[in-house]
Amino acid sequence: MKGIKTIAYLFAMIIALNAQSCGSDNDNNEPDQPTKNDIVGTWKLYAISTDDGASFSNWPFETTSATFKGDGSYSGKGYFGNGSGTWKQNGKTVITYVKGEEFYRYAINSLTSSTCTLTMSQESSKASILVKCVKTSGANGEGMMTISKSELENITAFESNDDGDVTYLKFRDGNIYTKEVTESGFVCNKDVISYTLSGNKITMEFGDQKPSGSINKIEFPNGKIGIYIDLNGTFGIAKWLSTAFEKSDYQF
């Protein structure tokens, strides 16, 4: 698996992203002892932090995920490498191995059936990074859930906080209304995006941009539900909206 010898460079690159790091996170719930089935599944990274764990930024690189299987094997895909190995659980820590040597270890900070917050590190480095993931599939049907159009449109709003800049989404009558409030209070990106929904498949249209992908319901450690949007493409609204949003009472 590539990247084993380049972790110091990787951390330096991520630290350089501080200008993009994001707003406050309240995942302070201490998780119960996870079971093996809690871990088994495919986890996709969607946010990352290198500071004190109080802030996160949307992951700006390629799709990055890891799949943990019940037989003790695992595979990784994306920015941290493509390859496979084995894994074991030690309390609230998951340790992965490649060719019999320890690769990454993940300390579980918070965990639900569809989301987790982890501290990711290597034995050979004192550095660590904090990551947020969504469980796209798992044991016993765990993972993200389909959300209906009526449920989407009956929720007041969804919000995502990025370095104090909060993006709000409201789904109404086949449209997505957006509002972004910056840390300074400046309001921008007040757009109306039309959308169609079929199961968990969503297609949007905004001018000449027509991204499509998936939208699913997720559960945050604070008990609130939210949505995770994953759109094809790395431009415009596809990049802007491909992240997790938490249910909010914000009205606009």
Image: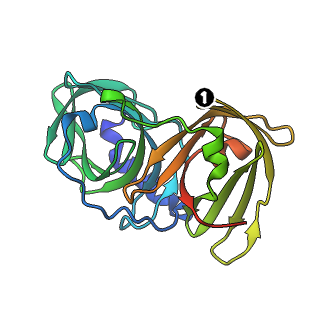
Q: Which residue is mark 1?
A: 199
Q: Position of residue 201 (x, y in %)?
A: 63, 30
Quarter where residue 65 is shown: top left
Question: How many discs mark residues in the rendered view?
Answer: 1
Would residue 29 appear left or right of 77 to someone viewing this image?
Answer: left
Would residue 231 appear left or right of 28 to someone viewing this image?
Answer: right
**Measured along the vertical axis of the image, is residue 148 above or below residue 28?**
above
**Measured along the vertical axis of the image, is residue 27 above or below residue 217?**
below
Q: Position of residue 137 (x, y in %)?
A: 40, 30
Please state, as top left, top right, bottom left or bottom right, where the N terminus lies in the image: top left
Residue 59 seen anywhere in this rendered image of the structure? no
Residue 156 seen anywhere in this rendered image of the structure? yes
Q: Position of residue 202 (x, y in %)?
A: 67, 33
Residue placed most toward the observer, 197 or 108: 197
Residue type for callout 1: Gly
Residue placed most toward the observer, 28 or 22: 28
Tell me which residue sits at (67%, 55%) in the image: 169
Quarter where residue 94 is shown: top left
Q: What colour scheme has been applied to the protein in the rendered image? A: rainbow
Q: Position of residue 28 (x, y in %)?
A: 32, 64
Quarter where residue 182 is shown: bottom right
